[in-house]
Amino acid sequence: MNTIILLGAPGAGKGTTAEGIKAKTRYVHISTGDMLREAVRNGTPLGREAKTYMERGELVPDDLILKLVEARLQEGGRDESYMFDGFPRTIEQAKLLAQLLAKFHAKVDYVFFLDAARDVLIDRLTGRRICRECGTNYHVRNIPPKREGVCDACGGELYQRPDDTEETIVNRLNVFRKETEGLITFYDEEGVLVRVDSAQHRDKITAEILEMLEELAGP
Ligand code: AP5
């Protein structure tokens, strides 16, 4: 069981990079943001509780997130290798993840920190469009669909995430600085942090990470 983490501010390209890695490996992609959005769509008790935090760009409480992650790891067990996207987001979550992995005799192998400047992040988030049907990610200028508003992959309608408004983006970036940035030092001290320039083309980012993953046994 290998475990990698994609760490980065909102808009750094965690989801986009995860898609690239998934296409070339057997890593199971665990995005807590996607899991929460699904819970909100389905109107579950967890989704109803998480919605208010997400709309404001605040972090959802650690105990709710941990329940989600633990349930997902128990489904797959030791035989899978995992790629976390958007988790952990606090030191507390990182410590709880380490405890959870220890139950499977596993540990975090690499944390890829996708590093980009604030103006790049804001441009990416305000321009992001997502397919309602298959979830494919676009950007109005950087990664445009062939037909405006229509997904190339499945023909579905493209929409803008409700937390991609300028006001919420600014709050999300502030929350990243206050709550999540400390993880860079935390994982650097553990010797597993790898910095990746996320202003590069997405294919270069994926290639850089895949090269490092070749060193790990497994998928
Ligand atoms: P989450 O869904 O995790 O959102 P986020 O961290 O804000 O990150 P994003 O999904 O916005 O950005 P990304 O880095 O994935 O970038 P993307 O690849 O899409 O979380 C949402 C909310 O859920 C949180 O605010 C919080 O409330 C809650 N939550 C989630 N996890 C939690 C946790 N663990 N604890 C507590 N609360 C939690 O790319 C962005 C755009 O840029 C796209 O348009 C893309 O096409 C474009 N792009 C990407 N890469 C490139 C590139 N290399 N070149 C050019 N364009 C690019």
Image: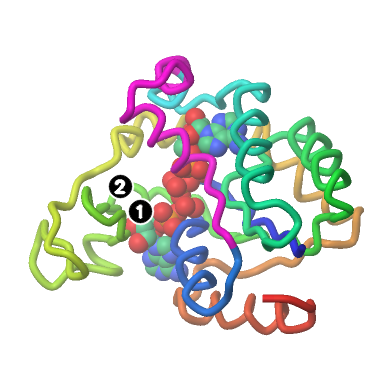
Q: Nearer the viewer, residue 48 or 208?
A: 48
Residue 123: mark in rendering: 1
| Residue occupying the point 62% across, 45% down | 75
The residue segment tinted magenta is 28-52
**Identity, as a three-letter code, of the amino acid under mark 2:** Thr
Q: Residue at x 76, y 50 (%)?
A: 184
Left or right for 107, reference 33:
right
| Quadrant of the drawing holding the N terminus | bottom right
Residue type at mark 1?
Asp
SS category of the residue bearing label 1: helix
Task: Classify residue 174 by image quadrant.
Answer: top right
Q: Position of residue 162 (x, y in %)?
A: 29, 33
**Disc 2 element:** helix
- Tag on residue 46? none
Task: Determine the main secondary structure of the stretch shown in magenta.
Answer: helix
- Colouring mode (rainbow / by chain / secondary structure / one colour): rainbow
On the image, the x and y values in percent for residue 48 come to: 40, 16
Q: Is residue 175 visible?
A: no
Residue 167, image x, y percentages: 36, 29
Task: Please rate how many residues cluster around mark 2, counting C-alpha atoms within 10 Å: few if below 14, some from 14 to 19, many from 20.
Answer: some
171 versus 120 height, above or below? above
Mark 1 close to ligand 1, CB under 8 Å: no
Which quadrant would the C terminus be assigned to in this image?
Answer: bottom right
Q: Quick check: can you spot residue 170?
A: yes
Q: Which residue is mark 2?
A: 126
Residue under the point 58% across and 71% down: 26
